[in-house]
Image: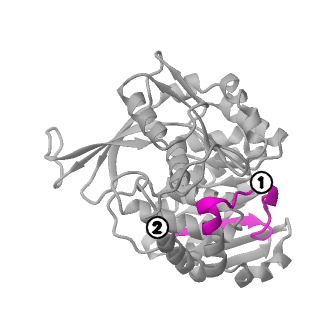
Amino acid sequence: MFRVKQLEHGDGEAVIIGGMVLDIHATPSFHANPRTTTPGKVYYVNGGVARNVAECMSKLGAKPYMISALGFDMAGNLLLKQWNSAGLSTEGILKDKDIETPTVCNIFDVNGEVAAGVASVEAIEKYLTPDWILRFKSTLNSAPVLMVDANLSYPSLEASCKMAADLKCPVWFEPVSVTKSRRVSSIVKYVTFASPNEDELIAMANVLSGGNEFSPVKEKLNKNTLSTVSLFQMLKPAIWVLLEKGIKVVLVTLGSDGVFLCSKGGPNCVKIPVDKTNQCGFGGQLYKTVMQSCPPSRYSGFSEYDRSSHLFAMHFPSVPASVVRLTGAGDCLVGGTLMSICAGLDILQSVSVGIAVAKAAVEVEANVPSAFSLAAIADDAKSVYTGARVIFQQSML
């Protein structure tokens, strides 16, 4: 396993704004009965979408700059202790005795899926204000990307994205949940990347189109009977809404079914300037290894489809895994993809790495593995990359 010496935040490092949350995971040893306790295990797990993404990137050798808020309570102390031990900057983390650190309690079923949960995360909206966020505008000057999660309030999302737009920094929007995904409505013109699951995609398309035209696939028929292409065809109208509203790249996460990568134009419609990438340390090793195992020449012919009126879509398969817990998979997929983008890999290579990193995440109890193997990531990314295929390319005029 690879653990890497941490460096100070600098060029080529992402800025992450959003929640740091203490997750309480309760897992019964056998099927739970209502109105009584059930024997099992209870774990305290460092969580929060933005925090998970940032920690994942740090375990891959990056030094993301986190902007968040914590209290001086038990949950806040646990989260801060882990952050300090990772050698990550706490400068952007507001710490105050009046803050009740965000906490989420999830009850899982025996298969590792969330059966029920309660979230107390109001502090993120209350204390992670535009004034606090704008104090750190200088950190975006050399950042290849800004990631915001939808735990932020509308004013804070707008302030964050406007700040990035002023500095021509791409924005990655992580929807967090169906309810919070609708907050994209106030910032869609600034968003470069978005990573909804199927239900979040539908919610985002409805709020952006001003109605309830779209409904989840599972409400229409049994998703398990659908082919990959058929599933995409059912989601395509909702995806097109997001792209038409200005989002450049939509990654629809499908769990064990993989990922749809969709854009107006081709897969290379967004490019990070070379001078903003970071190929030092693990990032450099990742870049060299993935460039060899996932050569960009494999998909070099797609440049002819880089037209703004064309919908381009690829499907990336998942990697078989020995599942322990599913809660960190989506965040690690985003973290692995962002890390790869920051290292200078293209979006197709980056998504392949992201899926490989997500595979490692589901095989441990924590939201983020304690360490990653470069060889394993490269092997799994190669499997994903070679299994990816174009499922749609057509003018939508």
| Residue ID for mark 1 | 276
What scheme was used to colour the molecule? one colour
| Residue 389 pos. (x, y %) | 63, 80
Residue 203 in the figure: left or right of residue 119:
right
- Identified at 48% across, 37% down, the residue is 84
Q: Is residue 383 left or right of residue 325?
A: right
SS for tag 1?
helix
Count of numbered circles on the image: 2
User: From which residue to which does the magenta span run?
Assistant: 257-286
Q: Is residue 4 above or below residue 232?
A: above
Q: What's the distance in space between the residues labelled 2 and 1, CA to CA?
A: 25 Å
Contact between marks 2 and 1 (CB within 8 A): the answer is no
Q: Is residue 291 left or right of residue 108?
A: right
Q: Badge 2 is on which residue?
A: 373
Position of residue 277 measured from the top left corner of the image (x, y, whole percent):
74, 57
- Determine the residue positioned at 67% across, 35% down: 157
Quarter placement of the N terminus: bottom left
Badge 2 element? loop
Residue at image x 68%, y 62%? 237
The answer to which quarter of the image holds residue 315 is bottom right
- Between disc 2 and disc 1, whose residue precedes? 1
Front-most of 179 and 23? Answer: 23
Q: In this rendering, is residue 101 above or below 322?
A: above
